[in-house]
């Protein structure tokens, strides 16, 4: 084990890696309850999604540990699950089975361009401002979903949206959870989001808002989602502009989400040398494999988690950390009864605070240059306003070439940006047909 994972070489031990794996698990365990809640909105079986989430996290993390030897855990990604449920299924009208197939297609394409080392070239072609805008916009979108699920924000016939009744039990519980989670985050707790979710759930039970039916049981059946990606109407659902748009958006978001996370965790661990990440191809292969397998199990895109930095902070330095994290997701399979107390009001604080964290990327935008500020603003704002991540990204990719050309900076754009400009104009034109 020491030789395979190079424990001594990395200044770590099995005990230290176990502690790091447990810390990472606590920091990202919230996804076990938030993901079924979000995908459940798309009509998927909540129990089956819970199992698929745990198995996808286990598989992805173990592959990362064995193939790339990095202390980076994987699970279905926040933002990507929101796009799956609220944009692809509810917004565009795809069945959740077809949306799973789109995830599968994106995973296979991701594997192909990783093996042939095309991925880095594509990443380099996309302006940094649009990468940051996409991350921040997704943050605002999932925060908006959190506020809506908590009934803190409600629909209003006169103003579209308005403040809900904060004295009602559900919104009051959510507000409590938001405040508790904020306190944990500000104090620097490694598992802040999970602890906030857990305490909110416990208070919900104590106050009688929710009812606990049990704690431990055999895992639910995964049959309602397993291999359902291929149970689709191929003629009317697969060979469509909507499907192409969904796959393109998934690829775009996963591209930069994964790259940013890998570099963030690897930099903290001291792996990055001369702005290069050793074994980057292996890490990307693990990520793409996890997405493909996760879609077959029945969950949205699986990706690397920036919460892995919490494990690195306590000494995790090898893939053994990721493997321990993955194994803990297997243990979590036996706690499915807790899903009964994890309502939209309980998960809302997690969505909102994760949204805050994602929105911090806006600090990298040069707001003094209007040719950059305008497309970034449209990308970020239209995601929550149109209830669609894909629409925000499409508008950003259409406006960016226009503002840059008008400013006389058109030559700075990679030719791929002009191709994407045309693709997204077509996509927007056929979006509602």
Image (cartoon, rainbow, N blue to C red):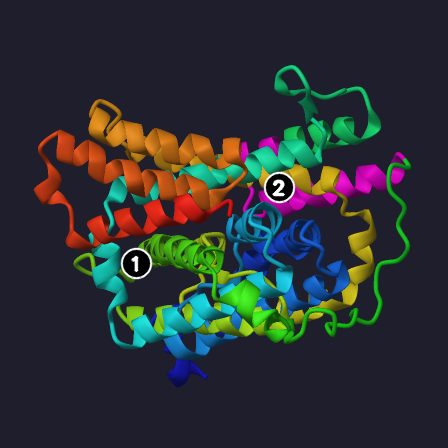
Left/right placement of residue 53 relative to residue 173 reads left
* Secondary element type, mark 2: helix
What's drawn in magenta, residue-wise? 181-207
**Which image quarter: residue 167?**
top right
Q: x, y (%) of residue 98?
A: 58, 64
Between 176 and 151, the one lying in front of the other is: 151
Disc sitting over residue 350 in the figure: 2
Q: x, y (%) of residue 405?
A: 14, 35
Between 296 and 78, the one lying in front of the other is: 296
Of marks 2 and 1, the one in the foreground: 2
Disc sitting over residue 302 in the figure: none
Q: Main secondary structure of the magenta part?
A: helix
* Secondary element type, mark 1: loop
Relative to 326, is 123 above or below?
Answer: above
Disc sitting over residue 270 in the figure: 1
Q: x, y (%) of residue 272?
A: 25, 60
């Amino acid at each position: 084990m020491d030789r395979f994972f190079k424990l001594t070489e990395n200044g770590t031990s099995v005990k230290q890696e176990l502690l790091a794996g447990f810390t990472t698990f606590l920091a990202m365990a919230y996804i076990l309850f938030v993901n079924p809640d979000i995908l459940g909105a798309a009509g998927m079986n909540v129990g089956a999604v819970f199992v698929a989430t745990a198995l996808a996290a286990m598989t992805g993390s173990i592959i990362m540990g064995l193939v790339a030897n990095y202390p980076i855990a994987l699970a279905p990604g926040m933002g990507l699950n929101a796009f799956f449920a609220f944009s692809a299924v509810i917004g565009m009208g795809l069945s959740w089975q077809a949306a799973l197939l789109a995830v599968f297609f994106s995973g296979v394409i991701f594997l192909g361009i990783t093996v042939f080392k095309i991925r880095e070239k594509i990443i380099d072609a996309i302006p940094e401002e649009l990468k940051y805008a996409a991350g921040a916009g997704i943050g605002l979108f999932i925060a908006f979903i959190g506020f809506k699920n908590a009934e803190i924000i409600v629909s209003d016939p006169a103003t579209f949206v308005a403040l809900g009744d904060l004295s009602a039990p559900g919104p009051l519980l959510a507000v409590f959870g938001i405040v508790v989670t904020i306190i944990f985050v500000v104090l620097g707790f490694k598992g802040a989001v999970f602890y906030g979710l857990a305490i909110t759930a416990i208070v919900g039970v104590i106050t009688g808002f929710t009812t606990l039916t049990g704690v431990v049981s055999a895992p639910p059946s995964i049959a309602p989602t397993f291999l359902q990606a291929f149970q689709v109407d191929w003629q009317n659902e697969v060979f469509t502009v909507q499907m192409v748009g969904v796959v393109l958006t998934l690829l775009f978001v996963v591209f930069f989400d994964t790259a940013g996370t890998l570099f963030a965790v690897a930099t903290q661990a001291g792996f990055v040398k001369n702005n290069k990440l050793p074994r980057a191809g292996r890490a990307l292969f693990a990520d793409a494999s996890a997405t493909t397998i996760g879609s077959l199990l029945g969950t949205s895109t699986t990706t690397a988690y920036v919460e892995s930095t919490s494990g690195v902070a306590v000494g995790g330095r090898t893939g053994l950390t990721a493997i321990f994290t993955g194994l803990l997701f297997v243990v979590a399979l036996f706690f499915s009864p807790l899903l009964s107390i994890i309502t939209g009001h309980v998960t809302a604080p997690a969505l909102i605070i994760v949204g805050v964290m994602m929105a911090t990327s806006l600090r990298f935008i040069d707001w003094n240059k209007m040719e950059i500020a305008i497309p970034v603003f449209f990308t970020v704002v239209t995601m929550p306003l149109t209830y669609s991540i894909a629409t925000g990204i499409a508008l950003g990719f259409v406006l960016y070439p226009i503002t840059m050309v008008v400013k006389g900076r058109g030559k700075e754009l990679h030719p791929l940006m002009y191709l994407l400009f045309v693709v997204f104009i077509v996509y927007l034109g056929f979006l509602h047909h």
